[in-house]
Amino acid sequence: MIDIQNITVRFGEMNVLNNISMAFEQGQMIGLVAPNGTGKSTFMNVLMNYVKPLNGKIVFKDGLCYSTKQNEVKIHTFVSMMPDQSDLYNHLSGREHLKMFATMWKSDLKLIDETIEALNMGHYVNKKTGTYSLGMRQRLCFAMQIVTNTDIMMMDEVMNGLDPNNVEIISKILLKKKAEGKIIIIASHLLDNLEKYADRIFLFNEGKLIDTNQIIEDFSQAHIKTIRIKNMESNTKKQLHELYPNIKLQTLTNDMTLIHLPSSEASLLSSLTSFLVERNVVDFAFGKVTLNDLYAMYYHEESNVTAS
Ligand SMILES: Nc1ncnc2c1ncn2[C@@H]1O[C@H](COP(=O)(O)OP(=O)(O)OP(=O)(O)O)[C@@H](O)[C@H]1O
């Protein structure tokens, strides 16, 4: 369990993290999503005690928090951060890196071969890392964290530079680790991947962490349906607006238009569908607001048209 209590981090005049409180439970995969420079790494650095917060504290199991150097050493036996590619030693092999990490964290050395096999690293793991491609280095960094076998694993952009097959392989390994009860915290820009695998996803907004599950829940309670339409022409939007003055249209910069239909207007659903089809607008879907939509709403919203 990680209990985050009233964490504030300020750089200059800016509160990068603004009084954040939340708890993460065992067996949860947590996704952190935001544009560059918003606070994802800072958040993880606070969890590692690499950045000291202005206020607040993080409480781990047995009430441990970063109050002394001794506690920090104890906490770092069960909390780890994925190494960065720049941490690799070019003159050592991948296997030597894995041995180093497994030994440092006193984990079962059997994990080394298991991880090499799971990540298809067998053909290169005995070569020096100086000869590796970007994706090979990234897989090694991931493998190094996996062999630590810590209860809490944090990964900043773990999928960077990986092809889709490797993204899937890593996602499956993460699911396995989650099933073993670990807490996995991932900052990522692969929204579809996070949406598929993460239990909870947070957006960073003005120093706060916004729980996307909560927003999606709010949408589904407040609106009977959201219609998601790709590439709707502005003329069609105008007509829609005139014909149905009570619906809320939201245009996002990912070329998506959302129609939020309140429950009181549910009877409009079939006529709205006919309206779209008659105008040859066929690329639309009913259903939940997606993580991509929320991202565009929070970080790229173009315009809001609310009919009254
Ligand atoms: N040590 C520091 N001193 C001053 N400002 C900092 C420091 N570390 C981070 N910042 C600022 O805090 C903000 C958040 O940075 P952070 O690295 O946490 O973003 P991020 O969301 O992880 O970005 P990215 O996706 O690019 O990794 C940025 O404006 C950054 O310039």
Image (tube, rainbow, N blue to C red):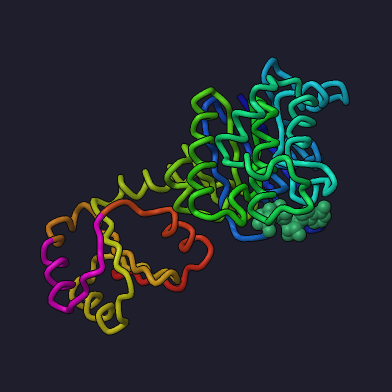
251, above or below 58, in the image: below
- On the image, the x and y values in percent for residue 123 come to 63, 43
Q: Is residue 183 left or right of residue 109?
A: left
Q: Is residue 165 left or right of residue 69?
A: left
**Image region (quadrant) for ligand 1:** bottom right
Q: Say which quarter of the image contains residue 63.
A: top right
- On the image, the x and y values in percent for residue 107 come to 71, 21
Furthest-bottom residue in this view: 235
- On the image, the x and y values in percent for residue 31 come to 54, 44
Q: Say which quarter of the image contains residue 189.
A: bottom right
Q: Say which quarter of the image contains residue 236.
A: bottom left
Magenta stretch in the rendered image: 270-286
Instruction: Answer whether residue 14 is visible to the viewer in this image.
Output: no
Q: Residue at x 68, y 23 (%)?
A: 60
Q: In this view, does 154 lie to the left or right of 194?
A: right
What quarter of the picture does the N terminus occupy? top right
Between 136 and 70, the residue placed more toward the observer is: 136
Between 112 and 19, the residue placed more toward the observer is: 112
What quarter of the picture does the C terminus occupy? bottom left
Between 142 and 230, the residue placed more toward the observer is: 142
Q: Which residue is drawn at 61% across and 32% down?
A: 115
Furthest-right residue in this view: 69
- On the image, the x and y values in percent for residue 83 come to 74, 42
